Image (cartoon, rainbow, N blue to C red):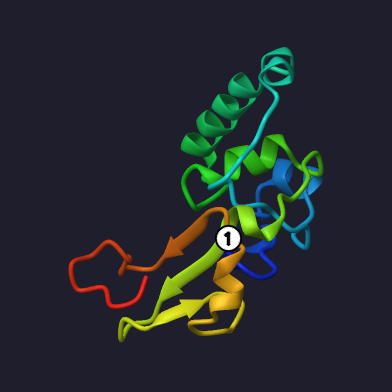
Amino acid sequence: RHWFGNPTFEGMLNFKDPEIAARFSPKEMYFNAGVFVALLEGWRRSNVTGQMEGWLRANSKRNIYQFGSQPPMNLVFYRLYQHLPLAWNLPMGTTAGGETELKQGRRDDDAYVAGAKIIHWSGNRKPWDKDANRY
């Protein structure tokens, strides 16, 4: 029910909506669209943009999901995607006290960070803040 770990549709979608309940499983995992790779020819052929716009319109009328731009992509690509290796969207954030927190439960683990292609910073504090002390 959260962005990292084992996120499921249960915390994202409104399963009281009959269409959502009929088409999707609350236990199905969703992906974080922060890093997304697509073949544009297939995107256009399948009218992915139109499908996502349809979900946006439906949500404005029926309140079928939360979390902004993530759900439309997950609804359109339901069970039709592959996960990128973790190195391409390595989750990391900060605690309320400003300590670096690796979302896999480790802290300041250089080996964990060393293989990262893209670090996904979550939380309020970012390494580019003027008072950042490590990354």
Instruction: Work out whether residue 64 or residue 86 is closer to the camera in this orientation and state it.
Output: 86
Residue positioned 55% across, 70% down in the render: 113
The front one of 22 and 110 is 110
Vertical side of 134 occupied by 118: above or below:
above
In the figure, is residue 20 to the left or right of 126? right
Which sits in the foreground, 134 or 72?
A: 134
Left or right of 33 on screen, residue 42: right
Residue at the image position 52 percent from the left and 38 percent from the top? 59
Residue at point 52%, 45% (across, down): 63
Query: How far across and down, in percent of the image, does residue 15 sit?
Result: 68, 55
What is the count of numbered marks?
A: 1
**Could you tell me residue 38's position as x and y percent?**
67, 30
Q: Is residue 125 above or below residue 118?
A: below
Looking at the rendered image, the quarter that the N terminus falls into is: bottom right
Is residue 3 shown above or below 93?
above
Look at the image and tell me in which quarter the C terminus lies. Answer: bottom left
Q: Residue 69 location in percent, x, y?
A: 50, 42
Front-most of residues 11 and 61: 11
The residue singled out by tag 1 in the image is: 116
**Is residue 13 something one can see in this rendering?**
no
**Residue drawn at 69 percent across, 34 percent down:** 76
